[in-house]
Amino acid sequence: MMFRLGQTILITSAGAAALLFVTWSRPVLAVGVVIIAVLGWMIAEAGDRPTAGGVLAVALPGVVQAMVSVRPWLWDWNEWLIWRRDYFFIWGYKARLFYVERGVVLRFLATWPDDFGHMDYPLLVPLQFDVVAVLGGRFEPRMFGPFQTLLGIALLAIAHQCLRDEFTPREAALGTLALSSAALVPWFGFGEPTLVAYAASGALLVRRVLRGHSRSIGPAVFFLACAAMTKNEGMAFFVAVCIAAPRIARRLWPAAAVITAWLIMRGVLGLHTDVFAGHFFARFMHNVPLIPRGLAFMPTYGSLTVAVSMIAIARNPVVHATRERFLLVLASIQILFYLAIYAGTPSDVVSHVNGSWDRISSHVTMLIGFAGLMSLRRPVSPEPT
Amino acid sequence: MRNALFAAFVVAGILPLASLFKAGEPIPHSDPRWDARHAELQCFAKGVLEHTESRSMIHYVLPEDVSDHGLVTQRLRYLVPGRYFEAGAAAVAPGQYIAAWHEPPPPGNVVWSGCGGVLLRR
């Protein structure tokens, strides 16, 4: 039930955001959300009956995170905190714009210059904030924190089922707790909590498909498409999934179709990204030697989890790395993409790395942590071929 | 070894969440001297939102100390969405707005004033 609920939360949140292309009426949206939730529940795959430990491992970290996410200074415009800029300049700005205009005014966004607003980003995050605002009756940013926490909880519920597939219930509960900070990332109001929730859910379900659970393919494709509609990094994530899982890449075509449609619309509207503009190759050669300097003093998110995972895998590297090659290759490709983007950035590369590495490294913490945990399993049944 | 690694995983997973609740951690406010000033600017911006139309062009004139290295444009966008902002009032076309806050207002018809500023229209 918990597995199903997690999928339903993610499906409903995305479906409700899409409804805003049709209506901004509160009652109509509320009815639409209920209908999508019921449909989502029916589409979602059922899992094992949750144990008390499993429920606690999913819910407790979520409650902690939700309490942290509503601290007023996080959302106060009067606090000009540098590290809160992305909410006010990108995600919150677009959400507030659409809310005030009662419409998705993409043509207006296209008239803005390339600046800190990232007008080229897809719109799932701001539209989800708007669903919260419309249903709540007013634009109250503090509610976005608990909402994004809910998405993280949904990811934890999905991760818990994936652990239950191969661990005892008690170990699955402990493993879920171990993955809590990988699912519940602390950048409230940014794209990261949403991206991590959808991308990691999609990846874990693709892994499940690769291990014989063919019913997981539907939600996996849907969540990967949603991740791609969160940030440009989500589109890169989809490409990385296709490379890491070539055997099922063709079955992911609906997500590719969604991405293609968005890229066409983005091109038509002129919402261009600045990374590939101008003299990309010259920038690449200039920036590459500077990247290590940017990384030198920046912590990697969940570095302790990553370190423990590496130790766990190193106990029998050939067996464990081979078995979890999908997640490990996926994480590696995604990190390579990020390093390539740093190399091509038109901004000062050291500042770019300093301002984003801890955040974007959180995109793969769940994948590495899960792979590490899996290397602790005791084989109880023959491996699927 | 396996149990120790499992325990290490759990600790590694919980620590980042626990660290969000550091006892006695001061709230990382910006300089408190700015709170009241920013609050007044926010109040003024809300008035500008209420007294301008969507897609209108607003030239803003603000003291240098709130320019935030030029990023005040992005900050104002959040409070006054759907409008265009331009720093300075050197090239104001007819029909466009000028929002002057704690600065001498340039010539124009007063549309609204309050919260330390005045909104004008050429």
Image: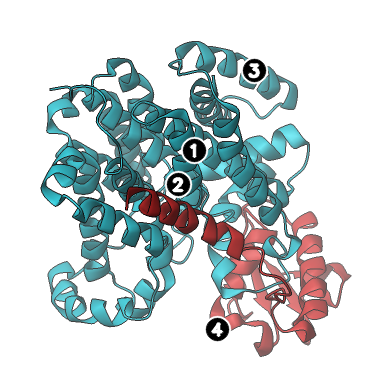
How crowded pointer 4 is (Cα within 10 Å; few <14, some 14-19, many 20+) is rated as few
The residue depicted at 44 percent of the width and 35 percent of the height is A172
Quadrant in which residue A293 is drawn: bottom left
| Residue B99 spot, x, y in % from top left | 73, 72
Quadrant in which residue A355 is drawn: bottom left
Please tell me which of labels 3 and 2 falls first in the chain.
Answer: 3
Please tell me whether residue B66 is drawn above or below residue A191 in the rendered image.
Answer: below
Q: Which residue is mark 1?
A: A156
Badge 1 marks a residue whose secondary structure is helix
Q: Which residue is mark 4?
A: B69
Q: Which residue is mark 2?
A: A179
In the image: residue A145, left or right of residue A172: right
Instruction: Tell me whether the residue at label 2 lies in contact with that at label 1, contact meaning CB atoms closer than 8 angstroms.
Output: yes
Q: Which chain is red?
A: B
| Residue type indicated by callout 1 | Leu
Q: Which residue is mark 3?
A: A34
Are dots 1 and 3 on a single chain? yes
- Residue A321 is labelled as none
Mark 4, mark 1: which one is toward the viewer?
A: 1
Q: How far separated are the C-alphas under marks 4 and 1?
A: 41 Å
| Residue type indicated by callout 4 | His
Q: Chain of mark 4?
A: B
Q: How far separated are the C-alphas under marks 1 and 3?
A: 23 Å
The residue depicted at 36 percent of the width and 26 percent of the height is A165
In front of the other: B59 or B69: B69
Badge 3 marks a residue whose secondary structure is helix
The residue depicted at 50 percent of the width and 36 percent of the height is A173
Badge 2 marks a residue whose secondary structure is loop
In the image: residue A66, left or right of residue A296: right
Mark 4, mark 3: which one is toward the viewer?
A: 3
Are dots 4 and 1 on a single chain? no
